[in-house]
Image: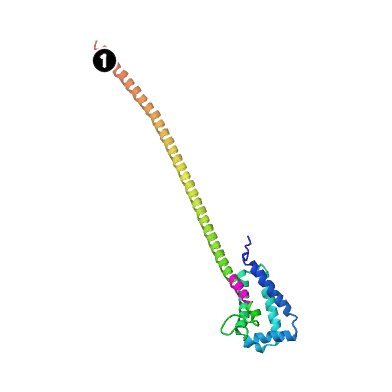
Amino acid sequence: MIRPMTSLGHWPSRLAAGTFILNSGLSKRDADDEAAAGLHGAAAGAYPFLKSMEPKQFVRLLSTAEIGLGAALLIPLVPTGVAGVGLTAFSAGLVGMYLRTPGTRHKGSVRPTEQGLPLAKDIWLVGAGVGMVVEGVVHRAALRRHRRRKALLRAGGAAAHHGRCRHRGAGEGRGHEHHGHHESRRHHGHGKHEGWHHLGRHGGRARHDESAATEHHGHGAAGMLWRKAHREH
C-alpha cells in the first residue's frame, strides 16, 4: 500500500507559500536591466559576496531557485520535511536581508519601517518552513514506529506459527509412537496366546498318552497275577 508522503495539515501553508514563490520566480524571468540591478543591489548590500555576480546572472539564478522551490511545495510527491527545509533556507535569506539592510528597521528595534515592511512580511515564510520541518520529522518518526511495530508483529506471528507446527509435529510423533506400542502389545499378546494354545494342545496330548500307558501297564500286571494264581491251582 502506498502511504502518503505528507499529512494534510500543512497543505494550506504549502499551497500558499508555493503559489507565492512560484509566481515571484516566474515574474523575475523577464526582468529588465533596471529591475535586475535593483534586485542585485539589495541582495549584495546584505550579502557582500554577491557583488561579484552580474545582475542578470543573479536574477536568473534567483528566478530558477524560486520556481524550483515553488514547484516542490506544490508537488505532493515531495515530502513535507524536504519542502520545509528548502522554504526555511530561502525565507531565512529574505529575513537576513531585512535584518542586514540599513533603513528597514527602526533604530534599536526589529520593528520594520515603511521601507522594510515588504521584507518583514516574509517572516511568515520562516514560520511555515519550520512548521513543515517539524511535521516531517514527526511523520518520519511515526512511520519508523509503525514499521518497527509491524516487524515485531510479523516476527511474533512467525514464532507462533513455528510453535504450532512444532506442537503439531510432536503430537503426530506421540500418536505414531502410541500406535506402534499398541501394535507391539497386540502382536505380543497374540504370540503369547498362540504359545499357550500350543502348549495346552500338546500338554493335553501328553497327559492322554501318559494315562493310556498307565492303563495298559495296569492291565498287564493284573494279567500276570491271574496267570500265576491259575498255575498254582
Name the dominant secondary structure of the magenta segment.
helix
Nearest the camera: 35 or 53? 35
Q: Considering only vertical position in the picture, is 196 above or below 177?
A: above
Q: Considering only vertical position in the picture, is 108 above or below 191?
A: below
Residue 215 image-quadrant placement = top left
Nearest the camera: 119 or 144? 119
Asked whether, in this view, residue 143 is left or right of residue 30, the answer is left
Does any portion of residue 126 appear in the rendered image? yes
Q: What residue sits 65% from the left and 87% below the top?
A: 44
The residue beneath circle 1 is: 228
**Residue 33: percent from the left, percent from the top?**
74, 86
Nearest the camera: 10 or 155? 10
**Residue 75: percent from the left, percent from the top?**
68, 69
Asked whether, in this view, residue 108 is left or right of residue 57, the answer is left
Q: What residue sits 62% from the left and 74% below the top?
A: 124
Range covered by the magenta-colored residues: 122-131
Asked whether, in this view, residue 172 is left or right of residue 199, the answer is right
Nearest the camera: 192 or 158? 158
Residue 52 image-quadrant placement = bottom right
Residue 121 image-quadrant placement = bottom right
Q: Considering only vertical position in the picture, is 85 above or below 167?
A: below
Q: Considering only vertical position in the picture, is 158 above or below 50?
A: above
Q: Say whether residue 128 is magenta.
A: yes
**Residue 42: percent from the left, percent from the top?**
66, 85
Q: Say whether residue 119 is magenta.
A: no
Does any portion of residue 72 appear in the rendered image? no
Task: Specify the quadrant that holds the C terminus.
Answer: top left
User: Which amino acid type is marked by label 1?
Assistant: Lys
**Residue 223: percent from the left, percent from the top?**
30, 16
Q: Secondary structure at mark 1?
A: helix
